[in-house]
Image (tube, coloured by chain):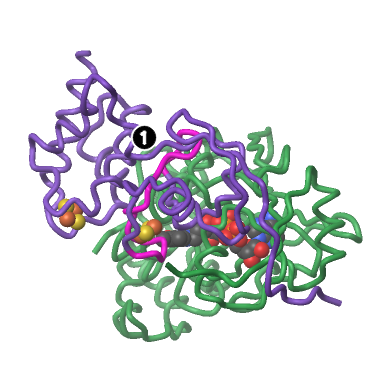
Chain colours: A green, B purple
Amino acid sequence: MMYPAPFRYHRPENLNAALQLLQRLGEDAKPLAGGQTLIPMLKMRVGDVTDLVDIGRLPDLDEIQLGESEARIGALATHARIAASSVAQRLPSVRDCAGGIADAQVRARGTIGGSISTGDPSTDWAPMLHTMAAIVEIQGPGGKREVAIDDFITDAYTTVLQTGELVTGVRIPLPPARSGGAYIGYKRSAPAYPTAAVGIQLTLDENDVCIAARCVLSAVASRPVTSAAADAALVGTRLTEEDLRAAGELIIADTNPPADVRGSADYKRSVLRGLFLQVGAKALQRAKGENIEGEHNYV
Amino acid sequence: MSETKPEFVEAVDIEITVNGKSYQRSVEPRMLLVEFLREELRLTGTHIGCDTSYCGACTIRLDGDAVKSCTLFAVQADGAKVATVEGLATEAGLHPLQKAFSEHHGLQCGYCTPGMLMSASALLDEIPNPSDKDIKKRIAGNVCRCTGYQNIIKSVHAAANELREA
Ligand SMILES: Cc1cc2nc3c(=O)[nH]c(=O)nc-3n(C[C@H](O)[C@H](O)[C@H](O)COP(=O)(O)OP(=O)(O)OC[C@H]3O[C@@H](n4cnc5c(N)ncnc54)[C@H](O)[C@@H]3O)c2cc1C
Ligand code: FES
Ligand code: FES
């Protein structure tokens, strides 16, 4: 068996106690949420962790609410609960993302707050939340603050979180009528992280002309890849395959995916081209009001 | 400022109900639940395959959810109800899932089987009449190197039928 190095374990009763503890213990203390990233890392003895502060049972941090103009998902909501929630019903790309992460066992434990806090470029929530222009709620010794999801992850495995701060939730502004999105990955198997993934949110006017677009590529750079040029290229078009292909080239051309066990840079670029068309077509159908399922592609 | 790295950490008292029986133990915080089950309680039905959160051989149920016990500290399960493969059979005999796996060749070497059974039991509690797709989605985190999965899917259908008729 692989053993983590010894650590002290704390289970505070509420959020304030957790925040005070984290501040007192300093930078080598880590919050433990679902543990689906942290425990494998501790078993491989990555990092010098002295203390774990188990936030997994903190009350009220796992609420999922669908409001009039926005949805709010508490940091401790698991992927599985989000997939089955009213928010996933309303926002199909949330359903694609939550239901496609890993396997049922990991989805039952892993949390949205833990996922974005890893800053891991292969995880799905941060890129998916980009397509919705979501806001991250943070609480720390200095009080509360809010950060746009695009500013939250600064580099691979690096976020704006300071020692002692916790993510408490994410807020998703609800898209207008005639808006639809999809988030789909290409995976070697369920428990494997995606080789690449694409998310697109499209908004149409009453003549089916695109009036807003937000695209993202995931798992192919040190952080989610966005492109104002690709988004702008889609606006004013009718989102034909040619329009999507042209915008895809704009965002894909700039990426240089790392060659690794999941494939070469060229291979990943061709996966991205296929995914971009597939996700764009699905987002368009959904923007037109069709209720269709999205599923990751498994090799 | 930061704490020093501990070389030794005091054991923590925990209480976990496993297959309906309550156990109180003192454990090191770094003890994984799978090890607690296998070494402390001698419930060796739960297998360790990859030890890297990938294969699902260690799947148990934690308050109903199928989860990987190699990716959970025993201290995190303090106060929880855990179900393992040992809890499936009753005095009346094997659980319908176990019977179906045996009758429909849902196992060969048996290494993945305890995890498969626990994932399948969580599925059937939630969806008593699953489709092929429901089954595939639920066991996608359970790797089997022997059967090719087809007979596992057949077995889960057979058990679902029997449970619905019961
Ligand atoms: C086999 C396997 C396959 C996976 N496949 C995928 C996949 O396909 N796609 C995907 O997106 N993810 C995947 N994951 C990762 C999974 O989604 C994790 O659940 C997630 O990345 C981390 O969430 P967690 O709650 O488990 O966090 P933890 O592991 O508990 O914590 C992760 C990190 O975030 C910190 N942290 C946790 N919560 C907070 C908070 N509220 N505020 C501040 N810091 C916090 C911790 O200190 C730690 O550094 C996979 C994991 C496994 C084991
Ligand atoms: S031993 Fe736990 S997932 Fe393989
Ligand atoms: S029966 Fe051998 S691994 Fe599944």
Residue at image position (21%, 24%) is: B93
Mark 1, chain letter? B
Of residues A67 and B117, the one drawn nearer to the viewer in this rendering: B117
- Regarding residue B125, the answer to whether it shows in the image is yes
Residue at image position (48%, 41%) is: A83
In percent of width and height, residue A161 lies at 75, 67
Residue type (three-letter) at the residue carrying disc 1: Ala
Residue at image position (47%, 76%) is: A251
Taking A78 as reference, is B122 left or right? left
Of residues A195 and A107, the one drawn nearer to the viewer in this rendering: A107
In percent of width and height, residue A169 lies at 70, 49
In percent of width and height, residue B165 lies at 19, 14
Q: Which residue is mark 1?
A: B122
- Regarding residue A149, the answer to whether it shows in the image is no
Of residues B32 and B64, the one drawn nearer to the viewer in this rendering: B32
Magenta segment range?
A: B50-66
